[in-house]
Amino acid sequence: MQGLTVYAPFLGILSLVIAWLIYNYVKKQPNGTPLMQELEDAIHTGAMAFLKKEYSVLVVFIIVVFILLGWGIAWKTAIAFVTGAACSIAAGYSGMTAATRGNSRTAEAANKFGQAKALNVSYFSGSVMGLAVAGLGILGVGFWFWVYGGDPDTAQYINGFAMGASSIALFARVGGGVYTKAADVGADLVGKVEAGIPEDDPRNPGVIADNVGDNVGDIAGMGADIFESFVGSVIATIAIGATMSVTPEFLAQFPVLKGLDPVAIKLKYMAMPILVVMAGLLSSFVGVFSIKVFQKGNPAGALRYTTFVAAAIFIILTIIITRAIGMPTGAFWAVFSGLLCGIAIGLLAEYYTSGPPVKRIARQSETGPATVIISGLAVGMQSTYLPILGICVATYIGFQTAGIYGIGLSAVGMLATVGATMTVDAYGPIADNAGGISEMSGLGPETRKITDSLDALGNTTAAIGKGFAIGSAALTALALFVAYTQAANLGQVVIDNPMVVIGLFIGGMVPMTCAALTMTSVGKAAFSIVEEIRRQFREIPGLLEGKEGAKPDPATCVSIATTAALKEMVAPGLVAVLTPVAVGFLLGKETLGGMLLGATVMGAFLALFMANSGGAWDNAKKWIEEGNLGGKGSNNHKAAVVGDTVGDPFKDTSGPAMNILIKLMSVVSLVIAPILPTLGLFLR
Amino acid sequence: MQGLTVYAPFLGILSLVIAWLIYNYVKKQPNGTPLMQELEDAIHTGAMAFLKKEYSVLVVFIIVVFILLGWGIAWKTAIAFVTGAACSIAAGYSGMTAATRGNSRTAEAANKFGQAKALNVSYFSGSVMGLAVAGLGILGVGFWFWVYGGDPDTAQYINGFAMGASSIALFARVGGGVYTKAADVGADLVGKVEAGIPEDDPRNPGVIADNVGDNVGDIAGMGADIFESFVGSVIATIAIGATMSVTPEFLAQFPVLKGLDPVAIKLKYMAMPILVVMAGLLSSFVGVFSIKVFQKGNPAGALRYTTFVAAAIFIILTIIITRAIGMPTGAFWAVFSGLLCGIAIGLLAEYYTSGPPVKRIARQSETGPATVIISGLAVGMQSTYLPILGICVATYIGFQTAGIYGIGLSAVGMLATVGATMTVDAYGPIADNAGGISEMSGLGPETRKITDSLDALGNTTAAIGKGFAIGSAALTALALFVAYTQAANLGQVVIDNPMVVIGLFIGGMVPMTCAALTMTSVGKAAFSIVEEIRRQFREIPGLLEGKEGAKPDPATCVSIATTAALKEMVAPGLVAVLTPVAVGFLLGKETLGGMLLGATVMGAFLALFMANSGGAWDNAKKWIEEGNLGGKGSNNHKAAVVGDTVGDPFKDTSGPAMNILIKLMSVVSLVIAPILPTLGLFLR
């Protein structure tokens, strides 16, 4: 059964074919009135323009890194790097294409056929992203495993694929994150505050950019993030399996491995993660199509059940795999702990961003914006406790049941059913956009009610998705760290080595610095959009008054937002890529090990803190808007809006950037591990 | 010369005698009009009432821990613990007594004799705190060193003294921090916002509590913090010296140690930190009295020169000591690196809370409170970079020049001249209170101008002092961590041990949780004060209108603030004390080692982030109040006030609590190290 790994690339291609068929199904759905089609086209064109411009910047980066990797490490690694980057780009591109086609069709389905059909269209539009992420990941990793996975010594070349995926992810997350919030803040500031027109009003030239932002941030950015985790966890686990030391004590622990030679054991351990994600993809197929059974009931339940179906089948398949290839039972428990941890972290994120903490924050609006901010920050800090404990428990169970290899497997278990979970993540922004389109094109209140309820559900799935993204990022970063310590032969590094301590501190700096940079970026980019919208209101005659024929020029807004976001993504990107290289060569590989841990710990805490603070502020504002504590327009509402505005870059820009940061730094370290000196330049 | 350590207790007593003489000199100064004396008495009585109530709570805690320590570890450690707690209490008590006597006298000196004399009185009032902290520290550590320091094996009992100092410090910092901000926010909310009367108006019953808060937070709290660092750094270095392994490779590195037997070398290394702080105290004497030469010039320069004088003499004495007792030259460089690092971190804190970043934040007020908050948070995060780098450099130099022992020595070097630096720290709140008293008692504009300028200078010294407190806390915590790893025999812990990684994550949780708890505490305590002030305005006839004979009842406000603050200090205190114990026994001493590092890294970053964000917001508001960007009362000012209100618990409650937290957890671990299991209960 271990030999089944050769079918991984084919399974990946099958997933892509299914995604393509679903995309055609979505495209065949009616997309409404000419106005709706026009809006859809504007959003689609804007999003694609952003991606193309982003990718054209990234091509330069990819070529430079390709040459450096080939020259400094190995050309085999460099080629794998390029394919990883290409797969990440392809996943983002196909997911976005489907999402931007799905939004108007969801609105029209709500208009013509009601809720069940609207849920069906938006869910399947999202599944293109889910199946593309899982399919491209398994295709790429499976292919390189087929090429290099037959020998533990050549497996290191596969690491390049993960680095490619990570590099693209950072730029996509930061660029997309800056874009989405700059457009949001910019459009709101001039539209709602200065001009006094409602949100999503078609006169506002920034509205299209805002809708584009939802797609480039929450679809392409989130997709690249999860793609990176998915690929990273599998490759880290392969790397741990390939470099582990099969000692007699190790063998004594696991009777099932008796009589096997070390290489055979390593190959078995390397094959396991591939088989697990193959099982996860098969389970996801069933999960995705099970929406057809559930779509007629409560939408929240329907989405939840699809992931449960995938998880249940996945558990059964993993038990079978563990038995069939003769792995110790602990391997199953490691996978299982990761799966549970992922679910738990998602639910915790939902609690902190919609449960009692949100009402506590909202009530603080009675004493003004300052107390809203203080309580939101406190909730965010408190919300780190249980999810981090979950990561600790998953790590502990993984380690206790399958050694350090178990940590990698735990991360794989969390991510294996990504085809189903990512589908639900991508559903959210599609439903959000569908709501925007039905507002802008003036569809009836019945339709609005459906799209509003689907949109509200999307906010919940977004919170769960964000929690899941952080948890999987932390566990993947840990797995990559373990792989790094083995690849760098760090067996003898003691924690009271001061250079490791210095590494921890340096590691902590990077997330702090990147969080500060990205928060400032949003402000800068938003300002350039504000200027442009003001200019249009001033220079286009009759626009603000809504005269016939006076049309805004959204394309210029989109183009300005694109340029600004791409400019801002360069600095944090370079910090993330260059810091591990600098620390590794100047201070040595032990310090680098410490740095990775420091960055992972700080990054995970900051990501949870920022995502949950931001989500809680957002929902505190929404709770007041529902008519509580004075409702919309009251002083309480104004205070809550301040919290929400602070929360925007927190939850959609800086927080998510942390996920990528910690994985990217770990994977860069893993790739350069073979050529790092024990003592850096400064220690000789 | 090594034998000079026996004189340490006497030098400590000499310092206390000098402090007592200075106190009498201060008390002899005229304290102004009957109204001023009344205000002074109210503040003094309120502050003393807080301390007494706080200490009566702490006595219970001390007794419980005394019994547990004696029963579980050693009665010798338990006795040292009680003396450490007693010295910390004595330092806080004497410093506060002098400070609350010094404020009205500073105001009167400004009124009668002008700026030079006012500076003289406030500086000398502060020096009582500085000399008491240094004197009691050297007295206590010197005494126990004399008792147990003659044998490396008994030196561990001295650790109890540090634990006593740390325990009191946590409660003093948290209790004082909650008190000062709750009173400040409470008095302002009802007074300025609701009743529309100016700040420090005598009709407001909360004003005295606000002034008391400055003393219990910034004097007693800060004093306990620095006392803990001072004592902790010296004791950690003694412990590292006592437990280090004198290998042939070690001896080969240092020709100066040739021919000595291991015990003799250990005793030399143990004596070094005592001699260094003795030199620091002697230098501080000269530094403190040099104010007489400088007081006629620019006050900012005068304060700076006193610390430079102390530092310069200290450097010379340390060179002499290193030579005279035959230590490797590296020991001097380690001390020197700590001294420089302390100065650098202080100056960086000043830059971030008064330089261009402050104006950048102020300008964001043009777009409302949300952007003020975002930019302040970004500045705070960015401001962690260079100070942390400074700590890394000090650690690196200490380690490269004198091994892990050098890290301890570097912390000692930073703190040795504490008699002079703490004097400047304590000067700030005294000048602040003097300003408040001259406002409340209606002294003339000439006097106000002097007290205002001294107060403004106090804000700068406070920023420097906060930076210094954080830097010294981080370096002391690291030194204690190193001492812990040696005491727990952790030589074989590798960083890729997942239990260490879990420890790092758990360690990160504690500062996050305590920060969230303390931020929430301020809100709760402030609310109870608001209720009381409202009640008095409602129930005391004629109070709000300022009728003759209608007097507020500040004592009740003081008592309510005291009760609320003391209640709120319990939860974070217990978290800090119990977490290391629980982790140590349940997950083993390796996990505990990881936890300490995680807590130190996270705590240091959060402390810098919160202190500098808060300080920058405060000064951004002040900069607008000076007439920039529309000045007081403008919308910009209102936006900046929101930032300042968020910053209050950041910089004066939660941020400073981090300093103590990381030291306390380290010292608790050091004390329980001998009885910890290698594998915890959960790992068997």
Image (cartoon, coloured by chain):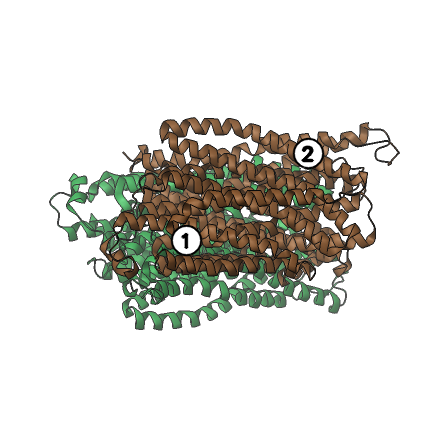
Chain colours: A green, B brown
Q: Height in image: A568 above or below A641? A: below
A582 relative to B42 in the view: left or right: left
In whole angstroms, how far apart are the C-alphas of marks 1 and 2? 39 Å
Q: Earlier in the sequence, mark 1 or mark 2?
A: 2
For mark 2, name the chain. B
Q: Please tell me whether mark 2 sits on a helix, a strand or a loop.
A: helix
Q: Amino acid at mark 2?
A: Gly
> Which residue is the site of mark 1?
B409
Q: Quadrant of the C terminus of chain B?
A: top left
Query: Is any part of residue B682 visible from this angle?
Result: yes
- From the viewer's side, name the closer residue of A447 and B649: B649
Q: Height in image: B492 above or below B62? A: below
For mark 1, name the chain. B
Residue under the point 69% across and 53% down: B119
Query: Is any part of residue A201 visible from this angle?
Result: no
> Which residue is the site of mark 2?
B46
